[in-house]
Image: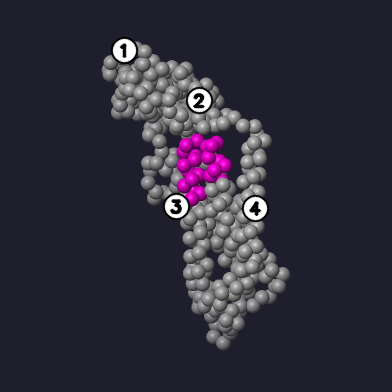
């Protein structure tokens, strides 16, 4: 399926590759500068954090048993801090590069997930390292304390666990925001094996597999299960879709031959020249969307194409014309999505409200018979 949006500009593939390479080069340069800065600051930063622990380095309870592992941990912390530092810039570059090729609902979803995920992820990471992790260490030391036996902590394991939990929290937040926005924007349905839901969970589980440190390998599976279950439990309490377009989703109906149809009616007012009806006058099985003038408003055409793709519309009916005045790119996109475009021609004929209501009823009846 090849879709053409109103803002699409014909460019050769080489131009897209060059743009991606330019943005990637800039990000790598900034990432290198951030890594260099944190390499310079990492020792005092780690010492300050260890000293702030309830059983910190100041009390001699933290030791390094594996010098090579400690070097690896230091570089892992440098990489993590460098990634966190460049995350806002990377988010901006991602949104800028992908903006032109997305449908309206996809664009809105990506913006909300990226901005919300980055913001909450950074705040959660800060809270985890400054408050959550020290509290967990103190609680573990209190619970497992044995009289007369001192407690020693491996610095490598301490930081490996902290880094691993940081990644897990970040992925939980991304999953929660992503699924919530997809639900509000009608990008996924309530079916448990919805393709969009499977793609989100599959991608995040793969990232968790890549980022999980060896210190947490024993609990990788329980954490993976929680990575799927917790967001699914939370989104059940989220509001129903209210941020989607004004389109009323069509209900699936069967024809006399057993074929499944999703019909969407576009009430185009043609700048006030076309006779109109209200959504309440149309059958509930018939999808509905209103716009001022499809021919003149490219954003309205993109929103309509978005509704066609999201709701798997098989028949799109225009109120004022038969669709031929619409741009060729739009009609080709509709055809490529396996949707048949037609119209009622109200702009060229004299109709009464009862006639228009009857025409809408006939559309629903013809879908069912």
Residues at marks 2 and 3, CA–CA distance in whole angstroms: 39 Å
Which residue, as the protein is rendered here, is positioned at the far top?
349
Task: Give SS at disc 4.
Answer: helix
* Placement of 32 over or under 341, stated as above or below: below
Nearer the observer, 314 or 94: 94
Q: In this view, does 102 lie to the left or right of 16?
A: left
Q: Quadrant of residue 43?
A: bottom right
Q: Is mark 2 on a helix, strand or loop?
A: helix
Q: Name the residue under label 1.
A: 350
Question: Which label is found at residue 51?
Answer: none
Instruction: Compare residues 170 and 196 and report the one nearer the observer.
Output: 170
Q: Earlier in the sequence, mark 2 or mark 1?
A: 2
282 relative to 328 in the view: left or right: left
Residue 22, position as x, y percentages in the image: 64, 45
User: Which circle, 3 or 1, is nearer the viewer?
Assistant: 1
> What is the magenta range?
94-115
- Checking the image for residue 28, the label placed there is 4
Q: Tell me the residue that label 3 is attached to.
A: 233
Can the viewer see residue 369?
no
Residue that appears at 53% across and 24% down = 329
What is the spatial separation of the Cα atoms under label 1 and label 4, in whole angstroms? 64 Å
User: Going from the N terminus, do you reach mark 2 or mark 3 first?
Assistant: 3
Residue 293 visible in image: yes
Q: Mark 2 = which residue?
A: 330
User: CB of mark 1 within 8 Å of CB of mark 4?
Assistant: no
Q: Residue 83: x percent and y percent?
A: 59, 57
Q: Residue at 33% of width from left, 19% of height from top? A: 273
Coloration mode: one colour
**Tag 1: Cα neighbours inside 10 Å, few (<14), some, or many (≥20)?**
few
Instruction: Residue at 61%, 69% (x, y): give it.
Output: 41
Looking at marks 4 and 3 on the same chain, the residue that comes earlier in the sequence is marked by: 4
Of pointers 2 and 4, the one earlier in the residue sequence: 4
């Amino acid at each position: 399926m090849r879709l053409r949006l109103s803002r699409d500009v014909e460019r050769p593939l080489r131009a897209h590759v060059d743009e991606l390479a330019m943005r990637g080069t800039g990000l790598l340069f900034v990432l290198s500068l951030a890594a260099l800065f944190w390499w310079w600051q990492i020792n005092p930063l780690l010492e300050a954090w260890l000293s702030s622990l309830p059983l910190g380095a100041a009390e001699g309870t933290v030791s390094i048993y594996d010098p090579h592992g400690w070097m690896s941990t230091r570089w892992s912390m440098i990489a993590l801090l460098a990634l966190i530092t460049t995350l806002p810039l990377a988010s901006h570059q991602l949104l800028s590069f992908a903006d032109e090729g997305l449908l309206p609902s996809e664009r809105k979803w990506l913006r909300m997930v990226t901005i919300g995920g980055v913001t909450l992820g950074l705040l959660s990471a800060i809270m985890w390292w400054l408050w959550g992790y020290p509290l967990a260490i103190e609680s573990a030391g209190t619970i497992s304390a044995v009289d007369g036996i001192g407690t020693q902590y491996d610095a490598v394991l301490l930081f490996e666990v902290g880094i691993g939990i940081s990644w897990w929290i970040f992925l939980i937040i991304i999953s929660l925001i992503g699924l919530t926005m997809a639900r509000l924007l009608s990008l996924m349905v309530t079916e448990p094996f919805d393709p969009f839901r499977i793609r989100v969970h599959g991608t995040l589980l793969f990232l968790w597999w890549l980022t999980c440190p060896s210190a947490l390998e024993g609990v990788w599976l329980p954490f993976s299960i929680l990575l799927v279950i917790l967001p699914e439990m939370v989104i059940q309490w989220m509001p129903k879709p209210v941020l989607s377009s004004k389109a009323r989703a069509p209900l699936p109906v069967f024809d006399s031959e057993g074929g499944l149809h999703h019909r969407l009616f576009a009430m185009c007012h043609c700048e006030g020249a076309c006779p109109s009806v209200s959504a309440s006058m149309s059958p509930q099985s018939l999808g509905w969307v209103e716009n001022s003038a499809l021919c003149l408003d490219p954003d309205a055409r993109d929103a309509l194409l978005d509704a066609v793709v999201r709701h798997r519309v098989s028949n799109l009916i225009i109120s004022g014309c038969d669709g031929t005045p619409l741009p060729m790119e739009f009609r080709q996109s509709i055809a490529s999505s396996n949707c048949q475009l037609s119209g009622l021609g109200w702009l060229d004929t004299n109709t009464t409200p009862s006639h228009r209501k009857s025409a809408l009823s006939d559309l629903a009846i013809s879908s069912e018979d």
